[in-house]
Amino acid sequence: MKISATIITYNEQANIARAIESLRCCDEVVVVDSGSNDRTVEIATNLGAHVIDMQWLGFAGQKNFASENAAYDWILSLDADEALSEALEAEIWHIKKNGPAYDAYTMPRMAQYLGRWILHSGWYPDRKVRLFNRAKAKWMGEFVHESVKVWGAVGHLESNILHYTCSSLSEHIKTMDRYTTLAAEQLIAERRRVGWAELLLDPIWTFLRTFVIQLGFLDGMEGLAIAYMAALYNFLKYAKARLMSPQR
């Protein structure tokens, strides 16, 4: 069993080395870059990755392009701000040694936010399909929140992908501005009408669910920030969709 690791990038010089260096269990690393103007391509190339330049096709499109251009059928897909934990790497070595029992595997993802590992707030275990046979799986999702659809049996690994998210609130706000625009475009494409109830009530419910029901208060100050930002995300998503809609 040989595995191709795939990573899509745009200006990821701060993260790409950590991601690639965690992929010792893979037989090649394919980086699909969409026009970075920092040192991303240089760093990836120096670490032995096969770098392909490709104009932006959307998140799912870019990741499918990476899978299609890999040398091997088994794909391990990471985002540039992620890395395999040593325990997860050991689990994958075990699969390689004994052969896969499934067509794809999920694994939990643990996020570091503002320097703290988050174990509540709806952020953990956040299971994702990231190891899969490309003949039985494909990335789906036109705008945001892309995911792998599997036509086959799915197994579950126990160790974590490590997700290094925002190190500052300013970074989080900048990222959220981009993603809420994409989310609003998705709502418009789906012909969703956004009413005042969603604008007023959904952010409040999101905060209460994240901080109280999903135990975000156990994540301390960082959990409070996550709850507020989740509420703001939903408000901005709906507000942008309403402002962008020709029917408002």
Image (cartoon, helix red, strand yellow):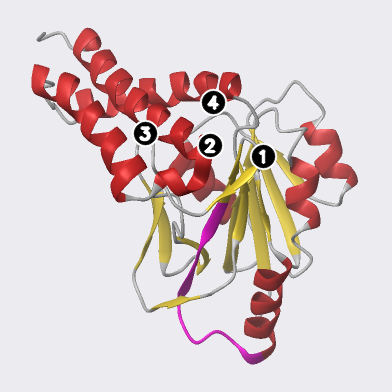
Residue type for callout 2: Glu
The tag earlier along the polypeptide, 2 or 1, is: 1
Q: Give the residue number, with chain letter if any, for mark 4.
A: 172
- Rendering coords of residue 152 (x, y %): 35, 76
Query: Which image quadrant: the C terminus?
Result: top left
54 vs 15, left or right, is left
Residue depicted at 82% across the width and 28% down the height:
39
Residue depicted at 79% across the width and 50% down the height:
49
Dot 4: few (<14), some (14–19), or many (≥20) neighbours within 10 Å? some
**Inter-mark Cα distance, 4 to 2:** 12 Å
Residue depicted at 73% across the width and 68% down the height:
86
75 vs 4, left or right, is left
The tag earlier along the polypeptide, 1 or 4, is: 1
Q: Give the residue number, with chain letter if any, for mark 2.
A: 222
Look at the image and give the residue range highlighted in magenta. Answer: 98-110
Q: Give the residue number, with chain letter if any, for mark 1.
A: 115
